[in-house]
Amino acid sequence: MDLVDTLRKKIDVLDEGDYVPGLKAVLLHIETAFRHLSRGQDSEDDTAFTDSIYRTNQAFEGSIKEAYRVLAGQDPAKKRPYDIENYLEENNIFRTRVLSQLTNYRTEWRNPSTHDYKLDFDESEAFLAIVSVSAFSCLLLDQIAERLAYMRSQAEAEAQKGALAANLAATVNADLLVRVTELISQFCAMYMPSVTTSFSRVSESQVVGALHGFLSSAAPELSVQTEARLDADKPFRADLLIERGDERVIIELKRRLMRNNYQNVIAQIEHYLLISGIKNGILLYLPDVPSEMDRIETTVRGIDARLIILTPEGSNPSPKQTASRLQPPSVSELLR
């Protein structure tokens, strides 16, 4: 995997904003760190490895400042990195995986190189520092992209709140699975995010954020979590978890419907329902462009759970592919 190319693509899909120059500076620092590493490998100048880590430190602090700008909605210009880090940690701004990468880089590389001016680093340490800060920046960019998509989608839905309420009025008192299915169908038909060049470049993080933002406006009575942990002792996470009272629905997103992997994806969400004890799930295959959605309504045998599979119109797998595993419920079951 080309880490620099991955970072560049994550920045390129973002809308223009005052955070973009800072994120591009982060990318430049990481590119320069790689060049220092190469210089040290190709010559006898071991100081290049230490130079590499000074550049990764700049990338680390730049990432944190732009996260503060987007995720906290505050200007980092006159804030010390120490104060920004404390704010982001104390207010639980970072997700668990982002926070673990922050802690790792800060402990292993930033703090030692900052506080010990006599310290020199070797090739292996420089390489690990680059990988560490790149992983941190990638995860942080996903969270930034999700937040930006959330705000944009929420604003767009707010602008059409009356029309949305009218379209969805019949589902207000329906059970949560029916309500959320109709909300997602409306989102896919009208509110899917796009970019100026190619829709296929929109990341899954952006779609998750956009759907979350749409739901926060169109159905404010719902509680929505993203990357929701399903079991305290296991690492499994749902893309979204929707709650209303004692009702819960797991939503799992997939970018493309791949028929040779279809049954594996079904098994994945069935497993999520099993380990979480949640009785309702939605598997959403995202359309490439705003689209009406087809649906397959099923029961999950053995755990008395319900699953709805949403696919772009005309792309449903054939009944032969699903009949062996999926048993459709009755209409009365869906509406009870």
Image (cartoon, helix red, strand yellow):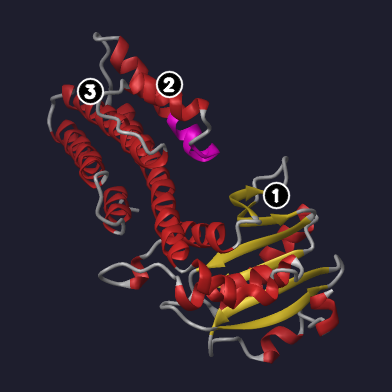
Residue 305 location (% of width, % of height)? 81, 67
Q: Is residue 261 visible?
A: no
The residue carrying mark 2 is 107
- State the residue position of label 1: 230
Q: Is residue 111 above or below residue 70?
A: above
Q: Residue 246, how many percent across, how many down?
A: 80, 54
Which of marks 3 and 1 precedes in the sequence? Answer: 3
Residue at horizontal 42 percent and vertical 53 percent from the top: 151
Local packing at callout 1 (Cα closer than 10 Å; few below 14, some 14-19, many 20+) is: many
Instruction: Name the residue that disc number 3 marks.
Output: 50
Three-letter amino acid code at disc 1? Leu
Q: Amino acid at mark 3?
A: Thr
What segment carries the magenta color? 94-102
Callout 3 secondary element: helix
- The three-letter code of the residue at mark 2 reads Thr
Q: Is 311 displayed left or right of 249 in the figure?
A: left
Question: How many angstroms separate mark 1 from mark 3 (CA)?
Answer: 42 Å
